[in-house]
Amino acid sequence: MKVSLFITCLADQFFAEAGVAAVRLLRHLGCEVDFPPGQTCCGQPAYNAGYWAEAKTVAEHTLEVLEAAEYVVLPSGSCTTMLRAFYPELYRDQPRLFARAEALSHKTYELAEFIVRVLGVRQLGQGLAGRRVAYHHGCHALRELGLRQEPLALLQSAGAEIVDWPAAEECCGFGGLFSVKLPEVSLGMADRKLDTLPPTSQVDCLTSTDGGCLLHLAGRIQKRQLSLPIKPLASLLWEAVQ
């Protein structure tokens, strides 16, 4: 099975280890992984800001870069949503490009989703035995892609304990441009979410499939001087194999 890794901007700039972990994990599971070198931003910032013409320019480039891929896998629920759900929306009135966007949509998956739903793997190893993990459900992964159990199942089958977090499914307040336009509200949402987290002495790390959410929460964790490591989901899943 051939997989093209779409690394995303935030993974490239802030969480390179997540990209490396994703490649290692997919190869461990028997996939042939390549990295299309022409890939750029998926265009989501422009799309969310209402600059659809600019988003289309980026999207058309991405369609070209990924056209020959058998599967496209991303360590990000947010960017997966852009390719799967929002690319077709961009081209509703352009049948030729809409068909290409639909074709890409049907072969695009977030990493944990791909492992469980396509590869049929639910047990990676026991490398997380005894680890107490707080899992943040990013809005795009949860609400657009419907991913709730897949990441949790992989973590738990590797021995991790998912800590009870009442606000695990609440928005962290990042929302891309939302955090720029309404920073006070954005920070308040992050603080509210962290207020509901068990004491850090009871949590070994916080993880999510989305780098933007992790950066946002990490900033507030640092500001509040909490001792809580942040790890991308892809990195934890690779540790599960060890």
Image (cartoon, helix red, strand yellow):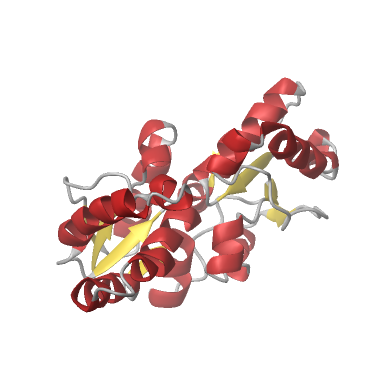
Above-or-below relation of 157 to 79: below
Q: Residue at x 73, y 32 (%)?
A: 184
Q: Is residue 237 left or right of residue 95?
A: right
Q: Is residue 8 above or below residue 29?
A: above
Residue 120 in view, yes or no: no
The percent position of residue 205, horizontal first and vertical second, equals 66, 40
How many numbered dots are placed on residues in this image? 0
Q: Nearer the viewer, residue 24 or 230?
A: 230
Residue 135 in percent (x, y) is at 67, 52
**In the image, residue 201 lies at what x, y percent?**
81, 34
Whether 157 is drawn above or below 201: the answer is: below
On the picture, is 231 further left or further right than 9? right
For image coordinates 75% across by 21% down, the residue present is 225
Q: Quadrant of residue 60?
A: bottom left
Q: Is residue 27 left or right of residue 151?
A: left
The answer to whether residue 111 is visible is yes
Q: Which quarter of the rendering shows the N terminus?
A: bottom left
Residue 163, percent from left and from top: 77, 52
What residue lies at 29% left-to-right and 57% top-to-bottom?
Answer: 27
